[in-house]
Image: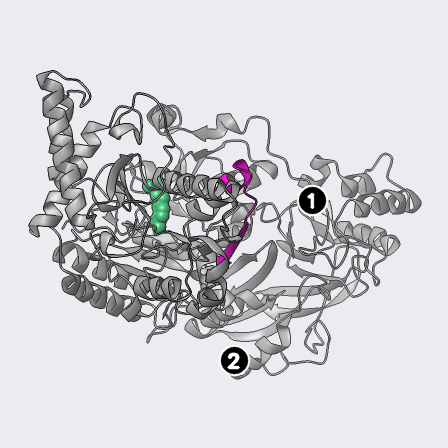
Amino acid sequence: MSATAELYLDANATTPVLPAALSAAQNAMTEAYGNPSSVHCAGLRAKALMESVRASARRVLGAGDGKVLFVSGATEGIQTAVLSALVALRERRARGEPIGSTLLYGATEHKAVPETLKHWNQLLGLNLEVKALPVDSDGRHDLSWLREQAPACALLATMAANNETGVVSDLPGLEAVLNDSGSAALWLVDGVQALGKLPLMLAATRIDYAPFSGHKLYAPKGVGLLYVRAGAPYTPLMAGGGQEGGLRSGTESMSSIAALGAVLNALEAGDTFTSRQTQGQYREQLAAALRDAFPGIVFNAPFELTLPTTLNFSVPGFASKELLDLFDAAQMRVSSGSACSANKALPSFVLEAMQLPAWRAASAVRLSFGPAAEPAFIEEACRRIRACGQALRRSALLRGEELCPAESGVYQFNAEGACCWLLTDAASQSCIIIDPLEELALRLETQIRSRDYRVLAILDTHSHADHASPRLALLERLRDRLADNADTADTLGWPDTRARRTLRDGRAVPVLTLGEQTLAKLPLPGHTADSVAYLLNDSHAFVGDTVLIGGLGRTDFVSSSARALFESLHSLAAVVSETTLLCPAHDYDFQFATTLAAEKAAGGLLAQVLCPRAPLSVEQFITEKTKADQGLNPPGSAQLLCGATRCQGNNDEQARHIQPEQLAAFLAHHPDVLWLDVREAHEHALGKSDPLRAETRNVPLTRLAEQMAQLLKEPRPLLLVCRSGSRSHKAAQALRRLGLTRIWDLAGGLAHYPPVYSQE
Ligand code: PLP
C-alpha cells in the first residue's frame, strides 16, 4: 500500500470493481457479446452465462423456489417490489378483502424506501397511511411498537443492515412479531448492505421481496438483483420485449451481469473476501486508531449490533464537514453522516431517528470498508487516522500533551451564519473573544489552553436576539485562564479599564491592550440600545450587527432605534478608514468582512447615508429602514435574520473559475501567480495543496478577514484553491467584492488532481 495513495473508506456508498469482475465484464463486451434473447449460438452462449450467474445468485441468497431477477440496482428493485405489493393490495381491496391501513417503513431506511412507498401509494390511489416504524437508541426497530401496529399493516419495509450505521436488523424478531400478531402484511427487506456480509437464507423466511445493488460489492453500478418469494404478488415495472420471462423487459446488461457473476463466484469460492472475524479485527484496529487520534470520540452504534465493516462516529466540537475535510486532506475518502447545504450542515436523519444528542447527529462520520480490504490497507488507514489527530493537535484544535506556540491573529468562526472572533497576540500570549457562540465554546477553550493564552476579555457586541450568549458560561470554563479584570459586571463583558485612546473624531474612548495593539470600545446604539463596536487599531472594527456585509442590522426589536442607528453610522464612518475591515456578528453569505469603501460601492442604505453629495436625511433613513426591516422575517421566527444583506456575485464570476483543462494555459499567461490554499491549516499540513508548484501560501478561511487588507494590496494575481472548489470560490467572491480584480479560483478544487499526501 503506497504511503501517498488515495484510501477509499466509503464502501457503503460504492466499491471499486473487482479485477475478476472487470475482466468478466470485458469478456462479455468483446467476446461473449450476444443478446441472451437471440436464438443463435452467440445468443445461447450469452443466455447460458446469464443463467449461470442467476444460479449463483440463487445459492448466495438462499432463494429456494423464489424468483431472482436482474434489475438495474436496488432502487429499481424497491420500485418493483412496492409496485407489486401495492397493486396486489389494491386488487384485494377492490374484491372487498381487508388489507389493513398502513404502509410501515423503518425510520432509518434509505430514502429510496419511504419515497417509493409514498410515490406509488399516491399514484395507485391507495391512500394508505405511510408511517415510520421507530428505532431505539441502538438503531434497532421497536418491536413492541410494531406488535401493536402489525395487525393494521399492509406492507412492512425494514432493511437488513443500515447504510449509515451498519446496524443489523433483528429480522427473526421482526418476522416473529408479524407471525405472532397474525399480520397479513407483505414484507420488503432492503438487503443492499447485507450482500456478502451477512448470511442470507431468504426462502427460509417470510420475506416477500429483497432488492440488492451490485456496486456495493465490487460489481459495476447499474446492476442489481431482486428476490421475490414464490407466491408473492408480482407486477412488472417495465413492459416490453418480455425479457426475464416477462417479469422485467429490456435487454439485459450482460457486461454488468457477468461482472456480478464474478463477484458471486468469489463469494461462493470463499477465496477473495475476508471473514466476519477478520473484518472484526480490522474494525478493532481502526477504532483503536480513531480513539488515539480523537480522544473524545463516540461511536454511534454498538459494535456488537453492527456490521464490522461500518464505523459511524462523532467527535465533540467538530462538524461532520470539518472531519470530512480533514480526512480528505489525508487522502482518505470517508462520508459525512450528515448532508451539507449552503449555510447549514443538516444532521443525519438516521442518528436523529435514534434520538442521539443533536451534536452527534451533526458531527457524524461514516467510515466503511469492503470485505476485500487487505491488512496493509487497514494499517495505512490507521497510520493516517493518527496523522489526522496529530494535525489537529498541531493546530490547537485538539488538546495534546505539548503546548502549541502562541500566534498573533484574528480568527473568524462561523456557526449557522453567526460569527465569533478570537483576537490573539503571540508575544504577550493573550487573547480576546468577541461574540462567543455556544457551538464554538469547546473550540475556543481548546485553542486557549493548547496555546496557553491569558484571556483578557470575553465581549459581546450587543445583546443578541437570535441566540443566548455563552459569555458567562465561558468565563466560568476559562476561570483559571482569565486576566484579573476579565470577569466584570459590565453586561457586554468590557473590563474595568482606565486606559483611553483618542479616535479620529477627537473622542476619547476606553481601550484594552492586546500586545502592541489596542481595542477601543465605541457605543453604536441602533440595532439594539446597547450595541457597540470594538476597534482594533485602525485595521479591524468588530461592528456586531450594526453593519452587515451588504446591509444593515434590523431595527425592529423592542430596544432598536433607526434614528439612533443613523447617528451611529455617522459615528462609525467618522472613526474608521475606508479600508478598515468591518467584521460583523453575522455573515450569512460567506463574505467574511467588508469595508466602508465596499459598502459605498454596493450602493445600499449605508452608502446613501454617507453619500457626500445628497445624503439621506434622518427621516428618509427611518422610512427606508422601516421598509427594509419589513422584508425580513419577524423576530421570534425559526432562523432569525439579524439584518438585511445583499451580496450578489459579479457578472464575470464564471470567467473567474479556472477549469482543470484551462489551468496550464492560465499559468502560462500568469507566470507570477500566487497560489493560495484556503483550507484550514491542519488540512494544508496534511495534503500538499498545489499539484503543480511547491510554493503555496495558506490563508485559511478562519483567517481570511485577518489577511484581507494585505491581500488587497497584493500586486501578483491570485489563484485560490481548496478541496472541492467551494471554499475557494467563496473566498474569491469576497475578495472581489472588496475590490480585488486579479483573482481566480480553481473550479472543482484539488479533487481533480492526483492525490498528494504529506507524510510529515
Ligand atoms: N438501500 C440502501 C440501504 C442503500 O445503501 C442504497 C444505496 O446507498 C440503496 C438502497 C439504493 O441503491 P442504488 O442507488 O444502487 O439503487
Left or right, residue 546 beside residue 725: right
Find residue 214 and report its horizontal and vertical position in percent. 25, 41
Residue 124 included in the magenta stretch of the image: yes
Occupied quadrant, residue 167:
bottom left
Occupied quadrant, residue 514:
bottom right
User: Which residue is tagged 1?
Assistant: 645
Left or right, residue 317 beside residue 402: right
Which amino acid type is marked by label 1? Thr
Q: Secondary structure at mark 1?
A: loop
User: Which residue is tagged 2?
Assistant: 481
Q: Nearer the viewer, mark 1 or mark 2?
A: 1
Residue 268 included in the magenta stretch of the image: no
Which amino acid type is marked by label 2? Arg
The residue lying furthest to the top in this view is 40
Q: Which residue appears at 68% of the width and 56% of the height?
A: 638
User: Label 2 crowding class (10 Å Cα cut-off): few <14, some 14-19, many 20+?
Assistant: some
Q: Secondary structure at mark 2?
A: helix
Q: Is mark 1 within 8 Å of ligand 1?
A: no
Against 398, is 235 above or below?
above
Left or right, residue 592 beside residue 15: right
Q: Is residue 391 visible?
A: yes
User: Label 1 crowding class (10 Å Cα cut-off): few <14, some 14-19, many 20+?
Assistant: some
Left or right, residue 528 beside residue 194: right
Scheme of image coloration = one colour
Location of the C terminus by quadrant is bottom left
The residue lying furthest to the front in this view is 96
